[in-house]
Every structure is written in structure tokens, then in C-alpha cells.
Image: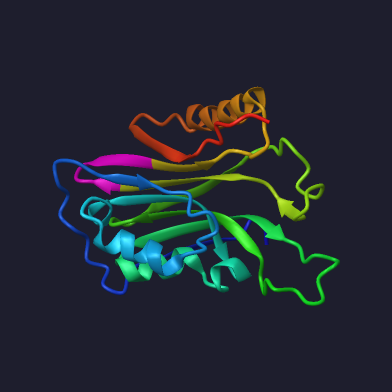
Amino acid sequence: VTYGYEYGCPIDPSVPVVGPQARAVVWNLGGCLHYEGILDTLRNHPLLSRADFYFLPAVDIGMARSENRNVARSLALELGCYYYYANCYLNLPSLKAKENPNPLGLEGNAILSRYPLTNLRIVSLANSVDPLRGAVKKIGCDKVLLADVKLGEKILTLACVRLSGLSSQAQRAQQMAGILKRFSDEKIQHAILMAGDFKTSTY
């Protein structure tokens, strides 16, 4: 389950004409607690609505806080985007709760794109803290989503990153080193657009 992923295309899969520039938005939706407001913003904001790519770290599938939605799929269908979601964590039910409010309890990262995504892959990051030790117990680890998109005759690799929370600068640097090593191992010669939540806070 923690290594599951999902890819989908819009109902009308017509590919827009590539313009002279591409716009990208990164937004940690914080569990998508206000889905309707988020959707309205992405639809109607004069700049955000015109983006070609959306990097969305921390989106849910089957979590009570987001009304049990498949957030990435729902937003992609509403916005007419291709989407790629990869699961990071399985949130376990609380032993104190009388019933499990999360039918699935999946939490991961997503990329939404106006253009088809190819060569989908995942980079797993080493945990800096034990996800079973916190108040909310989880199984899994943070992931980086990699996908390629063709813009005219050029290829662009998209990388959606979420580094570990409650981590030190040294731990985040180690995670970033692993991501950059993956780029080196793949011998990527074209441009890479990396965005997400780099957790640039301290303990």
C-alpha cells in the first residue's frame, strides 16, 4: 500500500498548444481541509488558474480530514489535468478511537499537469524520525515523484518533493543528496523542475 501510485488523464485529453513559457504552482494543501475553497482558487485565481503544472505535496485518499476524497484525482478532473499520485504513508487508526474515521488513511504527493506525463518513477527517502513514534502513527516514508513531460521538442523532468518534517538541516541535506544522486544515476541531460515542501524549519 505504501508504494502504491495512481495516474489519470482528463475527460477531454486534448493537449494544449505549448506556449513560450510554462507556469508552475507549488502548494502544500495541508490535508486539503478546505477543498471547495482550494478548488475555487485554482479555478479562478488570475495566475494560479493559468498554471501548466501543480506540485501538491501532502494530499489524501480516504482521510476524514479531507472528507474521504481522492484529492489528487478530484482536483485533476475539475481542472482538466493529467495527474500522478504516489502514496507515502498509511495512517493507522488510533487505539483510543471507538471507530476508524479514515476508511483508507492514505497520504502522499501529487503532480497535476496540462500535458501528458510519462516515465513515472518514485524516489523513497530515508526516515529521519520513526513514523510509528508520533501521536499519529504511520507506516511508510516520504517520497519524491518524478515524471517527464514533453514541451514541443524538449523534455522536462518534474520532481515533486516533500522532505521529512521534524528533521534537522543535516537530515534534510542527506535527503536532498539522495535526490540529486538519483538525477545523476539517470544521467538526465535535460532541464529538471523540482518543487515541493522542503521543510525549512528546525526542531
Closest to the observer: 152 or 133? 133
Q: Quadrant of the N terminus?
A: bottom right
Residue at left offset 15%, top offset 54%: 17
When the figure is inspected, residue 94 is found, relative to residue 23, above or below; the finding is below
Closest to the observer: 147 or 69? 69
Q: Main secondary structure of the magenta part?
A: strand
Is residue 154 rendered to the left or right of residue 107?
left
Q: Quadrant of the C terminus?
A: top right
Whether residue 63 appears in this view of the structure is: no
Residue lying furthest bottom in this view? 99
Whether residue 109 appears in this view of the structure is: yes
Is residue 176 rendered to the left or right of residue 156?
right
Residue lying furthest top in this view? 170
When the figure is inspected, residue 163 is found, relative to residue 137, above or below; the finding is above
State the image coordinates of residue 93 (x, y, percent, origin top left): 77, 66
Residue at left offset 71%, top offset 39%: 127
State the image coordinates of residue 137 (x, y, percent, origin top left): 77, 55
Residue at left offset 33%, top offset 32%: 190
Q: Which residues are magenta?
A: 150-157
When the figure is inspected, residue 46 is found, relative to residue 195, above or below; the finding is below
When the figure is inspected, residue 191 is found, relative to residue 41, above or below; the finding is above
State the image coordinates of residue 89 (x, y, percent, origin top left): 66, 55
Q: Is residue 112 magenta?
A: no
